[in-house]
Image (cartoon, rainbow, N blue to C red):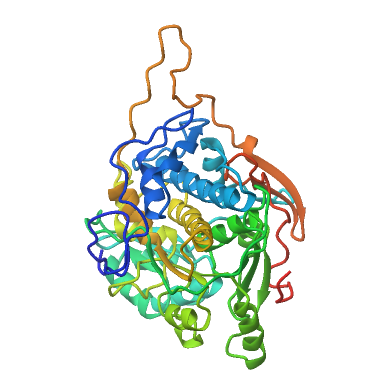
């Protein structure tokens, strides 16, 4: 697709003259301590994160193997991102507790359930609507186009971009789109700040999976002891993210004990159901960075934060003094983790995007097309969820590195396009399952074969939104937390203070 930068290998490091954050990806499978062997995707992720290859022996997988079925290796992406995040949490737990790194045993059923957490959510028995009527695939005059109009302002912009009345329904939208070339729809939407992408063939170009650099040598504040259930206790995380990927990352950090405060501008709406899914463990406030009083409050929070996670387009926060170089100059020990949709270079870098649109733009939708040629989708919003666990893993590894011989701040970058490139070009096909012995007992190293039942990994919790049925966290190591310490509060209603 237009705007992609050629990147031939995984993992990506940036800039080119910076030392790599770890060894190159392992060339062979890494044996694990029991269960299915740690696979190549997990080894690749762990190498990208700068982790020691010796720790891969702590990782194993179990649970149903028939989950997240797809023409692409979605199951392997999902379990690898969760395994890498679990191992990073276990490593930090070992540092803070002064013992060995706990064993990581990832349940593929738990992973599959968590990767569609938004679909399992119910609020007082009500099932939220995942996609609005104006969102989806539509036939264009010369192909297909994917739209995203879940937020009211996005729907308004889409209809305006196409010169349709504000009350136009899906039928009127479909009729007009069928008369226009897909790329014309895409560009008209882009110019209007709306969201539509022409469905493209599989792209041969590759974005880096992760980019990282050390931003100085400033010391960081020491952390006291902590148990394995809260390895990130005492860490302060400012969360400037929206819509699944970033919120999943910070939800995971909150699970592990971090004090996470989400900050949104007052003028951008948020869906209650989206926050009910990803707001577990966190607090949420609203601040206007153009208002001097609010900005002073934000600067006070930032001055004592350990981590800043942002999910805005490249350059969108620079005018507020939040460009990474400016942040590292003022706060030299800060970990800055940025994620975006389309990557950090090229003409598409500044475009808005969501998981569904990136799937369409990089060729996943075409790859998953049905026999009738209609574009398909992955069994989960795997780019969002996978990137979220990767971001959390990178932050956890940075926290460990800062306190074990590599002090200083960090600048970490991720994109949904990078995760999509890894899924399309970087994950090898599934290895054949080990054959069962003649006596019918499970083969050594084979995963469990029980039928997948998501109910095993669902729970119910009372919240400010009502009674929530929700997916449990998939992070798994010996002593790991099994649920969040607090349910989601009402979006934007918490005081802008650290606990």
- 384 w.r.t. 316: above or below: above
Residue 374 shows in the view: no
Viewer-closest of 147 and 340: 340
Viewer-closest of 317 and 331: 331
Identify which residue is drawn at 51% across, 83% down. 330
In the picture, the quarter occupied by the N terminus is bottom left
Identify which residue is drawn at 66% across, 77% down. 286
Residue 152 screen position, x and y as percent: 55, 72
- 74 w.r.t. 441: above or below: below
State which quadrant residue 209 falls in: bottom left
Residue 47 screen position, x and y as percent: 37, 50
Most extreme residue toward the top is 439
State which quadrant residue 20 falls in: bottom left
- 317 w.r.t. 170: above or below: below
Residue 306 screen position, x and y as percent: 58, 70
In the picture, the quarter occupied by the C terminus is bottom right
Viewer-closest of 458 and 361: 458
State which quadrant residue 43 falls in: top left
Residue 488 screen position, x and y as percent: 70, 60
Does residue 319 appear left or right of residue 285 in this picture? left
Image mark count? 0
């Amino acid at each position: 697709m237009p705007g992609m930068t050629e990147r031939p290998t995984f993992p990506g490091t940036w800039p080119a003259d910076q030392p790599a954050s770890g060894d190159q990806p392992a060339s062979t499978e890494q044996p694990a301590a029991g269960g299915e062997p740690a696979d190549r995707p997990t080894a690749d992720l762990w190498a990208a994160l700068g982790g020691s290859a010796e720790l891969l022996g702590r990782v194993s997988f179990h649970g149903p193997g028939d989950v997240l079925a797809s023409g692409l290796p979605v199951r392997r992406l999902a379990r690898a991102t969760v395994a890498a995040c679990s191992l990073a949490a276990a490593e930090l737990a070992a540092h803070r507790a002064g013992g060995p790194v706990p064993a990581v045993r990832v349940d593929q059923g738990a992973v599959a359930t968590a990767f569609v957490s938004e679909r399992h959510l119910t609020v007082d028995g009500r099932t939220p609507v995942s996609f609005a009527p104006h969102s989806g695939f539509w036939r264009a005059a010369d192909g297909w186009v994917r739209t995203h109009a879940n937020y009211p302002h996005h729907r308004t912009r889409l209809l305006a971009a196409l010169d349709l009345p504000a009350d136009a329904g899906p039928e009127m939208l479909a009729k007009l789109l069928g008369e226009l070339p897909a790329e014309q729809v895409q560009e008209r939407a882009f110019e209007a700040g709306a969201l539509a992408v022409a469905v493209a063939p599989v792209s041969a170009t590759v974005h880096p999976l992760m980019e990282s650099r050390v931003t100085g040598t400033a010391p960081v504040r020491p952390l006291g002891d902590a148990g394995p259930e809260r390895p990130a206790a005492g860490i302060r995380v400012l969360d400037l993210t929206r819509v699944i990927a970033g919120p999943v990352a910070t939800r995971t950090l909150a699970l592990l004990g971090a004090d996470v405060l989400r900050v949104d501008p007052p003028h951008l709406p948020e869906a209650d159901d989206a926050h009910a899914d990803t707001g577990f463990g966190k607090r949420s406030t609203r601040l206007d960075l153009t208002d001097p009083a609010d900005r002073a409050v934000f600067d006070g929070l930032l001055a004592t934060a350990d981590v800043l996670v942002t999910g805005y387009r490249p350059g969108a926060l620079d005018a507020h003094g939040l460009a990474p170089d400016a942040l590292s100059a003022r706060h030299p020990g800060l970990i800055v983790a940025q994620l975006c949709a389309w990557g950090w270079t090229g003409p598409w870098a500044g475009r808005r995007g969501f998981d569904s649109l990136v799937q369409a733009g990089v060729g996943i939708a075409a790859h998953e097309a049905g026999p009738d040629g209609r574009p398909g989708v992955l069994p989960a919003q795997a780019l969002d969820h996978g990137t979220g666990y990767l971001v959390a893993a990178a932050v956890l590894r940075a926290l460990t590195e800062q306190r074990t011989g590599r002090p200083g701040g960090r600048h970490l970058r991720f994109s949904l396009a990078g995760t999509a490139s890894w899924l399309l070009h970087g994950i090898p096909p599934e290895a054949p399952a080990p054959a069962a012995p003649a006596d019918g007992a499970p083969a050594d190293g084979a995963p469990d074969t029980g039928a997948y039942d998501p109910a095993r990994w669902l729970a119910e919790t009372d919240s400010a939104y009502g009674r929530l049925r929700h997916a449990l966290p998939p992070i798994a190591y010996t002593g790991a937390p099994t649920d969040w310490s607090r349910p989601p509060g009402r979006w934007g209603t918490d005081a802008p203070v650290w606990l």
